[in-house]
Image: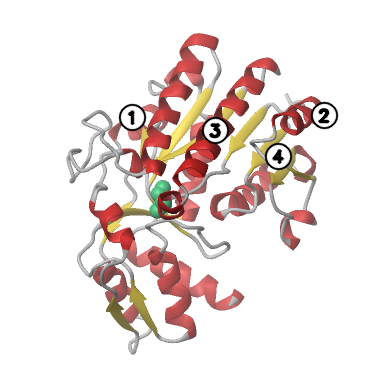
């Protein structure tokens, strides 16, 4: 069957890379990029594009009617730090947007839906190390509990309507093609830009704040392998834990220094993102992803840092 894939939130950190990867696999015409904002040059000139606001139900319905997608990736969301500044908007966009997509996917018989969850679904009373798939979850950010509620909706639509929804709890994502927008893990991208531009960086997270992170190449590969996995192998319809690589700002700075010896890191105090980071796991257990769809991480801290610096150098 030839695919028609709709990617919503195509201008974002994940969308920018996912559209390129999907267009390579399925051909440019099979992948409709969409976003609330005008696309960047690369996306606009490499295949079809639609302006979409996930809160505008009529417009969204029209897009489903026009393209009848076989797969939808819903990536439009407000992340953790911005979510704390605009809690009601974050809830509305993250929840209502998802429910619109789930409803239209049922109505138009979309074969598969992908929706991203996050390590933010865990909270201060979740185990902090090797956080398991199933445990206490008491997220205290709007972003975190919108993702936890979203996971419940995904599983509900799978059970109740047979909708083939698939999801990953992404760690903090690090890539060179696009910037993150308003998250707590963003320092791990900004640090590379500043290392190359100015040779120094002030981290808004403290020196020893460990968080689970993942290189974008691994994240895109994980997403596509989960979407390609035979449905009967998937035992989780809420969202799969993915471990990635856990490190602190100090450890990342040390790795960068191996290539930029004069690089200097300093630490800001009293940033509101610190409390968010402190409520999240330091490392994750992803045994279900390994077992169900053969997930295997490729990039470690050293190879990720090397790839980031090599590629980022060519674009900034
Ligand atoms: N990376 C996201 C954030 O920091 C979490 O999913 O908000």
Residue 81 appears in the picture as rendered: yes
Identify which residue is drawn at 57% across, 61% down. Answer: 178
CA neighbours of label 3 inside 10 A, class few (<14), some (14 to 19), many (20+): many
Work out whether residue 142 or residue 6 is closer to the camera in this orientation and state it: 142
- Determine contact: label 2, label 4, CB under 8 Å: no
- Determine contact: label 3, label 1, CB under 8 Å: no
The image shows residue 243, relative to residue 300, as above or below, that is above
Of the two numbered discs 2 and 4 in the rendering, the one whose residue sits closer to the viewer:
2
Identify which residue is drawn at 26% across, 35% down. Answer: 138
In the rendered image, which residue does mark 4 sit on?
A: 26
Of the two numbered discs 2 and 1 in the rendering, the one whose residue sits closer to the viewer:
2
Please provide percent x and percent y for residue 278: 23, 53
In the rendered image, which residue does mark 1 sit on?
A: 291
In the rendered image, which residue does mark 2 sit on?
A: 66
| Mark 2 or mark 1, earlier in chain | 2
Identify which residue is drawn at 75% across, 43% down. Answer: 27
């Amino acid at each position: 069957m030839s695919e028609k894939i709709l990617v919503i939130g195509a201008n974002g950190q994940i969308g920018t890379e996912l559209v390129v990867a999907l267009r390579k696999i399925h051909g440019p015409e099979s992948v409709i990029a969409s976003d609330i904002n005008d696309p960047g040059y690369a996306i606009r000139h490499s295949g079809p594009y639609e302006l979409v606001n996930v809160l505008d139900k009529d417009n969204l319905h029209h897009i489903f009617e026009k393209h009848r997608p076989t797969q939808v990736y819903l990536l439009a969301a407000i992340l953790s730090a911005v979510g704390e500044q605009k809690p009601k908007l974050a809830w509305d966009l993250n929840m209502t947007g998802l429910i619109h997509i789930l409803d239209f996917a049922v109505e138009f018989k979309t074969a598969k839906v992908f929706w991203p969850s996050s390590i933010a679904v865990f909270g201060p009373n979740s185990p902090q190390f090797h956080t398991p798939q199933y445990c206490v979850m008491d997220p205290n950010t709007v972003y975190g509990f919108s993702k936890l509620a979203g996971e419940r909706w995904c599983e509900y639509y799978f059970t109740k309507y047979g909708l083939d929804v698939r999801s990953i709890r992404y760690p903090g994502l690090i890539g060179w093609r696009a910037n993150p927008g308003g998250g707590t893990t963003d320092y791990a991208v900004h640090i590379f830009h500043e290392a190359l531009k100015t040779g120094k960086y002030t981290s808004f997270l403290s020196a020893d704040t460990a968080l689970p992170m993942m290189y974008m190449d691994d994240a895109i590969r994980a997403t596509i392998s989960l979407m390609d996995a035979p449905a009967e192998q998937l035992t989780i319809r809420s969202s799969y834990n993915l471990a990635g690589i856990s490190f602190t700002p100090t450890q990342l700075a040390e790795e960068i220094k191996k290539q930029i010896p004069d690089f200097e890191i300093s630490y800001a105090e009293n940033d509101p993102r610190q409390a968010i980071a402190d409520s999240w796991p330091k490392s994750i257990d992803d045994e279900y992803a390994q077992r169900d769809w053969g997930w295997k991480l490729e990039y470690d801290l050293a190879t990720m840092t090397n790839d980031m610096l090599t590629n980022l150098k060519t674009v900034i």
